[in-house]
Image (cartoon, helix red, strand yellow):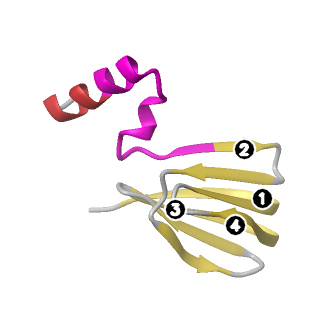
Amino acid sequence: MSKFNNFRSKLADELEIPNNALSDNFELRMHGNKKVIIENHLGITVYDEKMVSVKTNDQDITIKGSKFKIEEINNYKVIVKGNIKEIIFSMKE
């Protein structure tokens, strides 16, 4: 862990806030195979009924399935609902 990331982690602990609120890391949560919540994203790069791709600092997250809808999107969080069949993580080089 770099000194800067270590500093951010300690600062988050001192402020009693989640570590990912001050880091470049994303957080992904699933609710069954019907909902994905991605926090700390950089935007949506692909969106249609069968695929959604979300950009993060280190990688792209591609969600494949059917009947996708964006339930919520803001500067920090995106919520995708639908029938999720596959999630692919593509590291940036």
| Residue 50 percent across, percent down from the top left | 75, 76
Would you say 25 lies left or right of 51 here?
A: left
Would you say 5 lies left or right of 32 here?
A: left
Whichever of labels 4 and 2 marks the residue nearer the N terminus, that label is 2
What amino acid does circle 2 point to?
Answer: Met
Whichever of labels 2 and 3 marks the residue nearer the N terminus, that label is 2
- Residue 22 within the segment the image draws in magenta: yes
> On the rendered image, what quadrant is the C terminus found in?
bottom left
Q: Nearer the viewer, residue 75 or 90?
A: 75
Residue at image point 81% right, 50% down? 33
State yes or no: discs 1 and 2 in contact (Cβ < 8 Å).
Answer: yes
> Does residue 28 lie above or below 89 as drawn?
above
Helix, strand or loop at disc 4?
strand
Q: CA distance from mark 3 to mark 1?
A: 23 Å
Q: CA distance from mark 2 to mark 3?
A: 19 Å
Helix, strand or loop at disc 1?
strand
State yes or no: discs 1 and 4 in contact (Cβ < 8 Å).
Answer: yes
Report which quarter residue 81 is drawn in: bottom right
Whichever of labels 1 and 2 marks the residue nearer the N terminus, that label is 2
Whichever of labels 4 and 3 marks the residue nearer the N terminus, that label is 4
| Residue 38 percent across, percent down from the top left | 59, 52
What amino acid does circle 3 point to?
Answer: Asn
Q: Nearer the viewer, residue 15 or 24?
A: 15
Residue at image point 72% right, 61% down? 80
Which residue position is annotated with label 1?
A: 84
Label 2 CA crowd tier, 10 Å (few <14, some 14–19, many 20+): some
Helix, strand or loop at disc 2?
strand
Which residue position is annotated with label 2?
A: 30
